[in-house]
Amino acid sequence: MKKILSLSVVAVALMAACAVVPSGRHGELALIPLLPPLVVLDTEPYYFQGGVHYYYSNDAWYYSKSRSGPWTDLPRGHYPKETRYKGREGGQGWGRDHDNRRR
């Protein structure tokens, strides 16, 4: 009895850290780890977490089990609150030399 209870607690804790989303194939569901509130991307718009690859393009997020795809839309409710790029001012895609003053 104690083993079943402890396994149930572990299963609930693991599922709380993930999102169940449709995979788009034959009505299957996929267990996808949620993105953290802040995602900092390197020079390429890819992020990897929990065995899942994420791709950021045109203010939209996609996920896949492989970096080569196929890519599936990530539900908007699972987007990070903020996305930044390393080495870019304000996360807006500008380098240090960019003059962001309006002319």
Image (tube, helix red, strand yellow):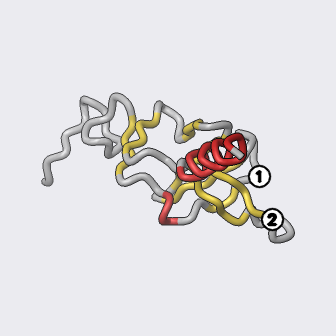
Q: Nearer the viewer, residue 85 or 79?
A: 79
Q: Quadrant of residue 96?
A: top left
- Say if 63 sits above or below 68 in the image: below
Mark in the foreground, 2 or 1: 2
Q: Is 34 left, or right, of 96 in this rendering?
A: right
Q: Which residue is mark 2?
A: 28
As shown in the figure, which amino acid type bears the numbered disc 1?
A: Pro
View extreme (front): residue: 1
Q: Which residue is mark 1?
A: 70
- Say if 84 sits above or below 42 in the image: below
View extreme (bottom): residue: 27
Q: Residue at x 38, y 31 (%)?
A: 86
The image shows residue 40 at horizontal and vertical percentages of: 41, 37
The image shows residue 32 at horizontal and vertical percentages of: 64, 51
Q: Nearer the viewer, residue 14 or 29?
A: 14
Mark 1 Cα within 10 Å, few/some/many (few <14, many 20+)?
few
Q: Residue at x 66, y 63 (%)?
A: 21
- Say if 88 sits above or below 100 in the image: above
Q: State whether residue 55 appears in this view.
A: no
